[in-house]
Amino acid sequence: MTKLAIILGVPIALLATIASLGVVVVDVREGGPDGNRIVVPVPLVFAQAALAVAPAVAPADKMRIPDEALEHVGLAREVLEALAAAPDGELVRVEERDELVVITKEGRSLRVRVSGERENVSVNVPLHLALQALPDEHGRIHTAALAGALGGVRFTDLVEVQDGNDHVRVWVW
Amino acid sequence: MRKSILAGVGLLALSVLPAAQAAAQTGTAWLHVRVEEAKEASRVAVNLPMGVVEAVLKASPEMIEKHGKIHLGEEHGLKMADLRKIWKELAAVGDAELVTVESEDENVKVMRKGDLVQVFVDNKAKPGKDGKPVKGGEEVRVEVPVSLVDAFLSGEGEEGNIEAAVAELQKRRGDIVRVKDDDSNVRIWIDEQNTQSPAGK
């Protein structure tokens, strides 16, 4: 009985620990009567570990942005910081005959919603994550800082795409 | 009984209404841009907190230098020093019609009225062979606060002071630009709403 408790208890405790550290869940649901449902949970800690070791294994030139993009990094940082400090509101709304695009600032995130006749897309961009993803003044991307920031996006819907009867959702639990 | 319920619901609605309106009032200045194109059935609305506008203007490398100054220089046809001199003279004049151009195609008026410089451009509708207009006219209305020009010209040398101009814009409330032609409508204004409510149209 004790053996059984240990055999079951260790993996359950391990799973509980991983889950408590956060899980990125990719949920794909295909439409139609024969549609499949695929759910891929990826422990956040794995993603963070991969990001943290990336500089050690990736070539140096892959860890920096092209020089021509470097001049816009300052502007991007200023805008993101100003947006983070700004009050919530609807920033952009584009209404066309068959499409609606809305970008709103909600708390610490930018939400982009695109609604069309057939598909609906919703993307949530946590501002602090976007700021951490920006390279430094030399164009170097600091993946370790990005890994740290990932912990702050728990319980967030990142992407939701509804295309006809197909549905894809990525969220962090 | 029914009357009391209705009265109760009415009172509740009245108490909620100001709260709902207040939710859109942020206390900070927002720059709004609205573009409507009837032919394309499209509407674009942009609402930006002035802090973000300031960040964009300050960090835009091609146009603006590091310290929030904009270069005019001789390549733009007018020296900043001349511009300052002209503006000083105009400020001394007070309210006046500064420029009036009347032609077959368009009328242009630039005037100083109180604390505003107003620019009105009216492009006249072009008549076709049968006398009916083939292309509608265009109306442009630009209102620039005098204090904004003062702030912009407060830079030194060949530089305009964009930082001071943005600080002035933070205080401004109301329309800045309105352009209207036969199939499009553009409006730029500043208020404290974080959205473009129908009342703000």
Image: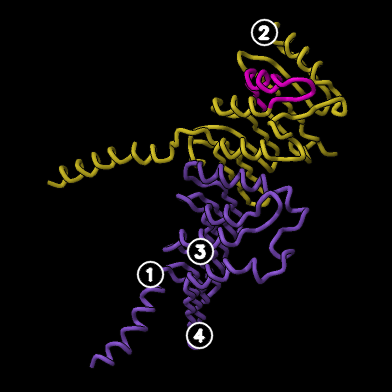
Chain colours: A purple, B yellow
What chain does mark 4 sit on? A
What chain does mark 1 sit on? A
What chain does mark 3 sit on? A
Residue in view at x 57 percent, y 50 percent: A93
| Measured Cα–Cα span from mark 2 to mark 1 | 70 Å
Residue B19 horizontal side relative to residue A27, left or right: left
| Measured Cα–Cα span from mark 1 to mark 4 | 31 Å
Q: Which of B201 and B32 is in front in this view?
A: B32
Q: In this view, does A104 lie above or below A49?
A: above
Q: Is residue A134 above or below residue B123?
A: below
Read off the residue under disc 2. Answer: B94
**Residue type at numbered disc 4:** Gly
Read off the residue under disc 4. Answer: A35
- The answer to whether the residues at label 3 and label 2 have Cβ atoms under 8 Å apart is no
Quadrant (top left, top right, bottom left, bottom right) of the C terminus of chain B: top right
Mark 1, other Cα within 10 Å: few <14 / some 14–19 / many ≥20: few
Which residues make up the magenta segment? B142-161
Secondary-structure class at tag 3: strand
Across and down, in percent, residue A18 comes to 41, 74
Q: Nearer the viewer, residue B178 or B92?
A: B92
Across and down, in percent, residue B70 comes to 74, 30
**Residue type at numbered disc 1:** Ser
Q: In this view, does A12 lie above or below A73?
A: below
**Residue type at numbered disc 2:** Gly
Residue in view at x 55 percent, y 72 percent: A163
Disc on the earlier residue, 4 or 3: 4
Q: Which of marks 2 and 1 is in front?
A: 1
